[in-house]
Amino acid sequence: MSDQTRIVILGGGYAGVEAAKKLHKRYKRRTNINITLIDRNPYHTLMTELHEIAGSRTEPEAVQISYKRIFAGTKVKVIIDEIDGIDFQQRRLKSGIATYDYDYLVLATGGHPEFFGVPGIQQHSFTLWSLEDAIRIREHVELMFRAAAKEPNHDKKRKQLTFVVAGAGFTGIELIGELMERADVLCRKYHIDRAAVKLMVVEALPHILPILAEKPRAKAKKYMEKRGVEILTSAPIVKGEKGRYILKDNRVIEAETFVWTCGVQGSEFTAKINLTKGRVSNDKCSVATPEGIHGMAACYFDEEEKNIVGERGRILVNENMQSVDHPNVYLAGDMIWFLKDEKVMPQIVENALQSAATAAANIAAQIDKMAAKPYQPKFHGFMISIGSRFAVASVMNMNLAGFSAMALKHFVNLHYLWGLAGFNACWAYLWEEFLDVKNKRSLIHGHGAARIPAFFALPARLWLGLIWVMEGVNKIGEGWLKFDKSRSTWMFSRGVVQAGSPTAAVSAGNVVVTSAQTAADAATAATDAGWETGAAAVEATGDTLVVVGNAVRSSAQTVLKKVWDLDKPILSPDSGLVTWFRTTFMDGMAAHLNFAAFQVMIVSVEILIGLALMSGLLTFPAAGLSIIMCLVFTLSGMFTWNQLWFVFLAIVMMGGAGHALGLDHYALPWVKDRWNSSKLAQRSYLYSGEPRLRKKKR
Ligand SMILES: Cc1cc2nc3c(=O)[nH]c(=O)nc-3n(C[C@H](O)[C@H](O)[C@H](O)COP(=O)(O)OP(=O)(O)OC[C@H]3O[C@@H](n4cnc5c(N)ncnc54)[C@H](O)[C@@H]3O)c2cc1C
């Protein structure tokens, strides 16, 4: 028998990834424990953002996070395959092409839409339960507008422009919110009167969003109705035909687009495996009402009033998230059937994450022969977006609506993404949600998305680079590389003895001589150069202009100084912060760093920053370094207000300025490739885009 313990996780959704991460954390140093995650896709899907793809707010890439990105630098091995069945006796998973043996198994294959046997619905509706579903809706909606734009038949056109979402839970409401905004954009694009577009939500229960408190629910309804969404409640759908949907009271809705979001059951995969499904009696089921299950009139319990779920039912687990049939099989996420306080667990992300953490902890407890930890779910609430700028939320006994709820939803998403793939995933999210949005569909409208072509920044980049080069060159001219002469004592406290050049440093340091010199050197370079260039230009046009120019300049300065003296340092040399910085950092450094080396370093860094900016090579780090230099000058009490443009221009440079007539265009792909394959980048999730895995992991 192998001395390796094989843990296999099937499904890389919220639950599967959480279980894999927790197990990696626990066993990263145990070479005899193998962790494998199997999913049919090469990426984790952010299911909670699918409505944004369906409504064309963000691109499909925004909800796909590759397993390579998530598990780079970990011991989790990822296999892309679709599993067809499990032999629990042999402890083996089977796909069409391979088999996979396990000692411990975590099943986390998620949920799937439930049609409750309503006739004709499955055949004649869209669903929103995968990226493919979302793309299908997105393309179909656009197709309908395109067709309607040239449809002469009034009835056909009306059907093409009617969009119905069945179900007013979070999936349905988030989807209609996106369609609401999408309709505005498509009406403009295809020259269609907005009043001709009909958006409807049809719900069997008496109200929308039953998971929320009354107040945010009412606000959500008001917001949607104000924007033309028709909301039908207490309106169970009893039959579906092509383009026709019949309600219990015999009303008929005609539409070419009908999306069913009414219920969720275990994934298709649960029908293929022989594990005990959840059963509950009618009066203890939280999804059953007198109207039927989930309010669907056509759905009731079976004869014994026990099994509400049939073949694809959710799978029964005990309090350790363990299958009741096999003690080495654990389950998590949407596919579990677990009752707490006589209520079945909701199919939400928090349940997926927490049940997965319990399953992982209890596998570890079983391996390490420790006590099991029962599932203690603690849910904080719900946030539901309605389009890109409005949301409602009931969170920890707080009810929110509008900007605050939407901001909270973004924050919660970022929190999840940080745990998933750190900075890399968070940056991709911020980019998609704020910096690369189309049609101003963002919480901050289009403010984050406006662009300046890199080409426009080219003169500024050359100029900033030139100033830094000249700064370094000037220092050489002033004798910075003649080491008997100290010009850097402005940075140190009186009497500090600098390593390597005691005589020069002490004598210079004792009188704090050259305070203004160096500070002015780097920090005022731009201003000086600016004035000099300006003066030179003016001189060329004649003495008279020089006189006028000087007069204007001096009177302007006099006026300015009265209000705000821009020549003053941002931090005064004797302020607390400057003193703290000097005594804590600079004096300490002076004792260790050879003074000559320090001078060479300053001169070299300035010239290198300048050359990098001028050639557009590694512009981002060069601009970052120049900001750090300015920060040091500020903390040394020498950086003045009118030199701040140095920093702002460097920020502009960081936005990709090196790509226009710069060497970054050629060098960055190479640098990225090297960096993305480094262990440091992978462990810290600081790679850019996708990591590159060099070694084959066992
Ligand atoms: C539009 C929408 C909005 C939502 N909004 C919210 C929200 O705001 N808040 C909230 O809490 N919840 C929300 N949810 C619900 C939430 O997404 C689910 O509860 C969550 O995805 C469950 O996680 P899971 O890991 O159990 O399953 P999933 O995330 O569905 O992952 C299952 C994984 O298993 C894989 N898989 C399945 N079968 C196989 C097989 N046979 N072989 C290999 N791989 C397989 C799939 O590819 C998938 O990666 C929303 C859902 C949708 C659709």
Image (cartoon, rainbow, N blue to C red):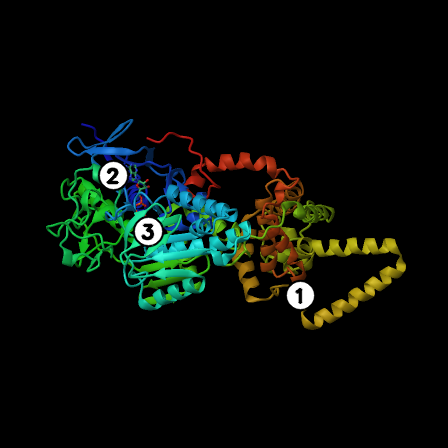
Q: Kindly identify the amino acid type of the residue bearing the numbered disc 1.
A: Lys
For image coordinates 13% across by 41% down, the residue present is 325
Point out residue 266 in the picture as x, y percentages from the top left corner.
24, 45
Residue located beneath label 2 in the image: 269
Q: Residues within 10 Å of mark 3 (few under 14, many from 20)?
A: many
Instruction: Left or right? Give the position of 171 relative to 481.
Output: left
Q: Are marks 2 and 1 in contact (CB under 8 Å)?
A: no
Label 2 residue near ligand 1, CB within 8 Å? yes
Q: Determine whether the residue tagged by mark 2 lies in a helix, strand or loop.
A: helix
The image's mark for residue 285 is: none
Q: Nearer the observer, disc 2 or disc 3?
A: 3
Label 1 residue near ligand 1, CB within 8 Å? no
Q: Quadrant of residue 180?
A: bottom left
Residue located beneath label 3 in the image: 245
Q: Earlier in the sequence, mark 2 or mark 1?
A: 2
When the figure is inspected, residue 57 is found, relative to residue 561, above or below; the finding is above
Q: Earlier in the sequence, mark 3 or mark 1?
A: 3
Q: Kindly identify the amino acid type of the residue bearing the numbered disc 2.
A: Phe
Instruction: Left or right? Give the position of 626 relative to 61.
Output: right
Rounded to the nearest angstrom, the CA distance separating label 2 from label 1 is 71 Å
Residue 426 showing in the rendered view: no
Point out residue 197 in the picture as x, y percentages from the top left corner.
46, 55
Q: Looking at the image, which is closer to me, 574 or 235?
A: 235
Residue located beneath label 1 in the image: 568
Q: Are marks 3 and 1 in contact (CB under 8 Å)?
A: no
Q: Residues within 10 Å of mark 1 (few under 14, many from 20)?
A: some
For image coordinates 82% across by 53% down, the residue present is 536
Rounded to the nearest angstrom, the CA distance separating label 3 from label 1 is 74 Å
Q: Kindly identify the amino acid type of the residue bearing the numbered disc 3.
A: Tyr
Q: Earlier in the sequence, mark 2 or mark 3?
A: 3
Rounded to the nearest angstrom, the CA distance separating label 2 from label 3 is 29 Å
